[in-house]
Image (cartoon, grey):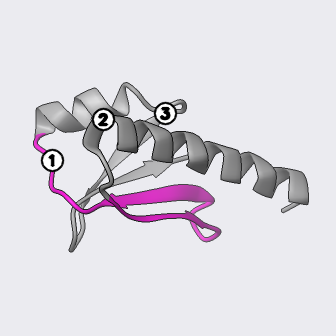
Amino acid sequence: MTEADFDAIWRTQDEIRTVVNAVLGESIWNLSYSQRRMAIELELTVHLDEESISSLCGQFPISADYDGEGIKGTKFVFYP
């Protein structure tokens, strides 16, 4: 992975963080890049219902997939 790739990932993570903070407030438990999955993983500190998950997914700058429920909250995955 090149430095340019990491720059794009960091920018995307910032955009994801901005959406979450605007919609849910400070509720990010984990936001990181997984080299194994080649994806950005997000876990919230809250568990969302189906309607809220769908609404939030529609606001992200790139496609988001529901990734289940983690220990702390709802999880999403992004494939940049």
Q: Is residue 35 left or right of residue 69?
A: right
Q: Earlier in the sequence, mark 3 or mark 1?
A: 1
Characterize the local packing of mark 3: few (<14), some (14-19) or many (20 or more) Cα atoms within 10 angstroms: few
- Of tags 3 and 1, the one toward the viewer is 1
Q: Is residue 38 left or right of residue 18?
A: right
Q: Residue at x 38, y 44 (%)?
A: 21
| Secondary structure beneath label 3 | loop
Residue 31 included in the magenta stretch of the image: yes
Q: How many neighbours does mark 2 have within 10 angstroms: few (below 14), some (14-19), or many (20 or more)? A: few
Q: Amino acid at mark 1?
A: Leu
Which element type, helix, strand or loop, lies under badge 2? helix
**What distance separates the C-alpha of mark 3 from that of mark 1?**
18 Å
Q: Which residues are magenta?
A: 28-49
Q: Is residue 59 visible?
A: yes
What residue sits right under mark 3 in the picture?
A: 63
Amino acid type of the residue that numbered disc 3 sits on in the rendered structure: Ser
Please state the horizontal and vertical placement of residue 17, each as a whole percent of the image: 48, 47
Going by the picture, which residue comes out furthest to the bottom?
A: 71
Q: Is residue 15 magenta?
A: no
The reply to whether discs 2 and 3 touch (Cβ–Cβ < 8 Å) is no
Q: Which residue is mark 1?
A: 48
Tell me which residue sits at (33%, 53%) in the image: 26
Q: Quadrant of the N terminus?
A: bottom right
**Could you tell me how far apart the alpha carbons at marks 2 and 1 are, in whole angstroms?**
12 Å
The residue at which mark 2 appears reads as 23
